[in-house]
Amino acid sequence: MTPVGLQHYLILAAVLFSIGLYGALTRRNAVAVLMSLELMFNSVNINLVAFSHFLPDFTGVLFSIFVITVAAAEVTIGVAIVLSVYRNRNTIDLEQVNQLQG
Amino acid sequence: MEYAYVALFLLGGLAFVGATLTLNRFVTSPHRPSASKLLAYECGEPPIGEAWVQYNARYYLFAMMFVLFDVEAAFVIPWAVGFKTMSLDLGILPLLEMLIFLSLLALALVYAWRKGALEWV
Amino acid sequence: MTDAVFFVLAGVIVASALGMVQARNLFHAGLALITCFLGVAGIYVLLKSPFIAALQVLIYAGAIAVILLFGFMLTHHVMHTDPHKRFTQQAAGLGAALAMGLVLVVTIAVSPWNKGAQAVPVSDLGSLGQQLLTTYLLPFELASAFLLAALVGAIMIARKEEGPPPA
């Protein structure tokens, strides 16, 4: 077996991204969809840090700090929106929050 | 391999949990469940509802503030570590830049305070 | 040895991620998510980025997981399960995810990656901070403005609209 290199990390990230995508597409609970989005953020970060390690050039590491910042802000706002929807509709089942559907 | 310590701690923690749970089976009384023994409180008072209740939304504002200042730490730590070498090159500039950064975040704290997000009413 | 650690961590990450998307009980999904975050932190350690690993534990496994757990504790009776979507939607989601994964994995497998340069550890924390305050000064300051905006927005959205705010 070849030693673990860049490709192994990239494939791990790709698999994680696909799992996150599956979750985001199939979960009905809005919070579960946010969780799946976090999985996808994580896989992007693995990519950035892996490239940064193997190039080597630490711009990727710096960028991943910004990605983490954005992820934290995103989840804060996301859950706030979920709370707001819950207060107004009394459900966060995405099948039933469909008033904006054309 | 400086992370062998971390792995050691992980294994130690798992072993401790496993050992305690295993020991529990030998030390405590025999397990003969009955309906009244399986109640959450074995004192004759029937529990009302589940333990999983919905929490008050007020907690969320505190969790939010926690996240904000947790992320702030992510930026302050590398600044603090590199501050000495940076000051030699750039003088007072790193300090000013970090002050701008922190004052913007302090503004967030002030906003939350003024809006009453920190009050427990 | 390092390779074995990688495969163990990859197994933990993939298994817990699958557990997260499959778990009907949202609390279990949250616990699986935290396991996944910790596994990813291990990956960062393997990639010689201990600072990012620490951030992963602090921010993802700490703050973001807490926010998400709050999210459904505040909106959901936790022990109630999340119902399945309709079968067609499940199948469509699975198909899309599999197609995406297949494209990514094949692209990664056939692309000629530069395998030569093995990393010299360049990213000590101090020079990282220096880069942050020189080359990346604008994103750095914008990040704080961004966090400010996020907090203000979240407070505006999350607060109950009941009467004037306490003065």
Image (cartoon, coloured by chain):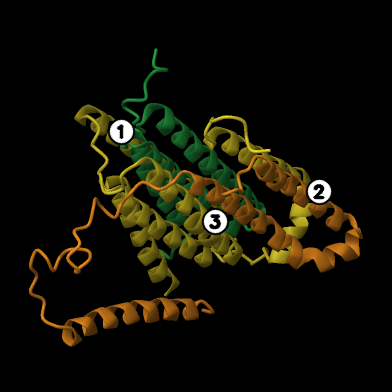
- The residues bearing labels 1 and 3 have C-alpha atoms spaced at a distance of 29 Å
Looking at the picture, how far across and down is residue A59, in whole percent?
A: 67, 52
Question: Looking at the rendered structure, which numbered label has been put on residue B100?
Answer: 2
Residue corresponding to mark 1: C93
Label 2 close to label 3 by CB (< 8 Å):
no
Q: Is residue A55 above or below residue A21?
A: below
Query: Residue drawn at (57%, 38%), measured in percent from left and top?
Result: C154
Q: Amino acid at mark 1?
A: Gly
Query: Taking the image as drawn, is residue A1 in sight?
Result: no
Mark 1, other Cα within 10 Å: few <14 / some 14–19 / many ≥20: some
Residue corresponding to mark 3: C59
- The residues bearing labels 1 and 2 have C-alpha atoms spaced at a distance of 45 Å
Apparent colour of chain A = green
Q: Amino acid at mark 2?
A: Ile
In the picture, measured across the screen, residue A33 lies left or right of residue C58, that is: left
Apparent colour of chain C = yellow
